[in-house]
Image (cartoon, rainbow, N blue to C red):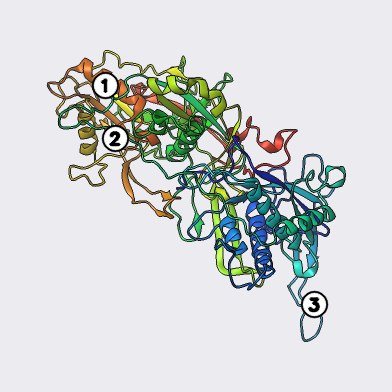
Amino acid sequence: MSTTSAFPSPHSPVSFPLHVVFESDWGVSTGAGIAGGVDAVVEKDERGLPVVRGTVLAGVLREQAFVVAAALDRDAPGDSSEPSDDGHTWNDFVTALFGDAEHPRLVGFTDARLPNGAAPKRAVHEVVSLSIDEETGTAKQDFLRFFERAAACELKGEAALADFDPQGQPLVWKDSQVEAARLVLSLAGLLVRGIGSNRSDGDGVCHVLVGDPHKAKSPGGHLTVDAIKGWCRSQLDSWKGTVPTVPKAEGEVQAPEIPHASASGEEAAPPAPSRFFTAMLDICLMTPVVSYEVPLSNEVRSLDFLRGTVLLPWVHRRLRAAAPKDALVRDAVVAGDLLVSDATAVIAGAEGDSLQGMPVPLVLSRPKNPPQSGAADDGSTQPASPVGTTATNRLLAGEPEDVHKPLRAGYVFVPADCPNDSGNVVGHIGAPALVGRQSTAHDPATGGARSGQLFLVRALPAGLRMRATVTVSERLLDRIRPLLAAAFPQDVEARLGSRRLSGTYGRAQCGLSAFTEADPTLPGEDPAFTLWFTSDVLVRSPQLGPGGSLEDLLRTFRRAGAPVALVGQGDAQGSSASSPEGAFTAGVRHKRVDSWSAAEHQPRATRTAISAGSVLRVAPSEGADGGAVARRLAQLSVTGVGELTAQGYGRFVINHWMLKKEQIHLAELHQADFLNGAQTQAERPDADSASGDQEEGRA
């Protein structure tokens, strides 16, 4: 999983406008068709208008940029095979700019889109094609083909330079380096002759114009081919005999310095934080976002939530940018002062509030063949239950008489407080449907698709709203409070998830609420506690290897100062006497957790985790102080239990009101419920580019 962004932050953005001016029909095909309709459709954005994805722009400009580098190195004074005096060549600069197998690229591209209100009357139309027999010169039988084409138009996008390296260190571009990057991109754009499919038939003829219209002295502030050519000629003269270099991080990466207690006790580690404050991090996806999951064959898969592993580096980096020399901010993660939870989907509640998704408790089940609405069991015409799902809480109910199936996937959306329930729906259940986009790699020599390089990318859809929790200690909040307005202005743009360097994925707008003191609710008088894990839990086995068993989890609670045991199994005060026969005391599942290291360019070791949604019914262990255990559990519910709690693992809630009900009525959600009410950048009147496809479907 990629955990750092290589795109500009709002602190010091370095970007260039990019225009794609098509002079003929064109179309970037998706490789898919419509049954009973056209055989090949063109790529479209969420407005139904044609688009050139950032992945396509990166590919065509990269190819021509190396042609530019070869020409500049060949025209250098002296032997063209020799590098410059400092050992650098233009080919090295272009390689670093666009990246290679060992280094991520330092330039990214947004999708090129039609500006709002500038779409032609018929932006997309259909054409007919057929195949000609080479021997007879006549049309072949059964070779009639319909496909889509987009009309000639001008698309707008952006090329952006990175300001952070994979280790999160800032990159400072000098003016000369910025001008060199712009020169390479401008020349590469001028060399592009066509984009999309059917270029051999005359489709896709275009000009790619990269640059600043003011510096290029474009008439009327519009980029033109002549203006870009004139600027490039003036720049070529100034670069004779010199070769640029790319910026490097200033200084070495400094490891956090956490003092440990010495044998004499003179240097003791600072006490662990005791008071914490929380804020909501609201995220609106502007483009599809890929949340890393292990690829399967030729499919790039995505989780239906964003791990704290993705969000924590982004939050921490912004704080470090605001306080670059502050040791407390630098060491905030390893010292336990900064924690970020997973981000899950958010929907609009019935009363205008926002409901955040929580993993379905793994103690819920529903009938395999539920009664149909309008036909109750007694034969009356009254509905048997409200529209949706009637789930049975197996913590409170015994073995059902009819056949039940467990609920193991999705999220429940319920209010924080128990509503007045009279048999009506008390919440919702569902999950955001992922959108898929088929892509293929192209052969730069032929311009055609490479054989066997077709793959499918699944991602969280654009327009989805998500929410995470940022938790900081009191001492850290005192230090960063004056910096929060600068570090997290309203609607900060972030690059999140995998494949974000492509420009097609990973753009999101984030907003951080005000911090309030975390006030964990203490359990009531019930001596037993119901723990509902809202994120995956990582624990260690006695051999210090990957754990994940129930015994490992209970052992972790004991080490954390909250000795508990399953109700009826070694507890002092809890009892299962009141529970019906066949009721559960726990609902636990396990899963593998994989991630990718962007800095090391390799997958991390697989971990075994207790899955989010697991539920335990526990009580203080024999001989333990029940009040102390309850207070410690309340504290752990804020910071998490187990390993990697700073990345959102190990979060749980205690005695949630929903798990005190034997029957829970949940309405089913559709994809529109997740996307309605979210405003993407494309819907804003002052925006020219934004996100990818949305897909209507059942969640």
**Residue 427 vertical position relative to residue 287 in the rendered view, above or below:** above
- Across and down, in percent, residue 9 comes to 58, 38
**How dense is the environment of label 2, judged by Cα within 10 Å: few (below 14), some, or many (20 and up)?**
many
Residue 59 falls in which quadrant of the image?
Answer: bottom right
Q: Nearer the viewer, mark 1 or mark 3?
A: 1
User: CA–CA distance between discs 2 and 3?
Assistant: 69 Å
User: CA–CA distance between discs 1 and 3?
Assistant: 80 Å
Is 276 on the left or on the right of 691, as rendered? Answer: left
**Residue 190 vertical position relative to residue 479 in the rendered view, above or below:** below
- Across and down, in percent, residue 540 comes to 24, 41
- Of the residues shown, which amino acid type is indicated by label 2? Gly
Q: From this viewpoint, which residue is outermost toward the right?
A: 219
Q: Are marks 2 and 3 in contact (CB under 8 Å)?
A: no
**Residue 617 vertical position relative to residue 173 in the rendered view, above or below:** above
Mark number for residue 642?
A: 2
Q: Are marks 1 and 2 in contact (CB under 8 Å)?
A: no
User: CA–CA distance between discs 1 and 2?
Assistant: 14 Å
Mark 2 or mark 3: whose residue is earlier in sequence: 3
Let me know if residue 386 appears in the view.
Answer: no
Q: Nearer the viewer, residue 401 or 345?
A: 345
Q: Secondary structure at mark 2?
A: loop
Q: Secondary structure at mark 3?
A: loop
- Across and down, in percent, residue 569 comes to 16, 29
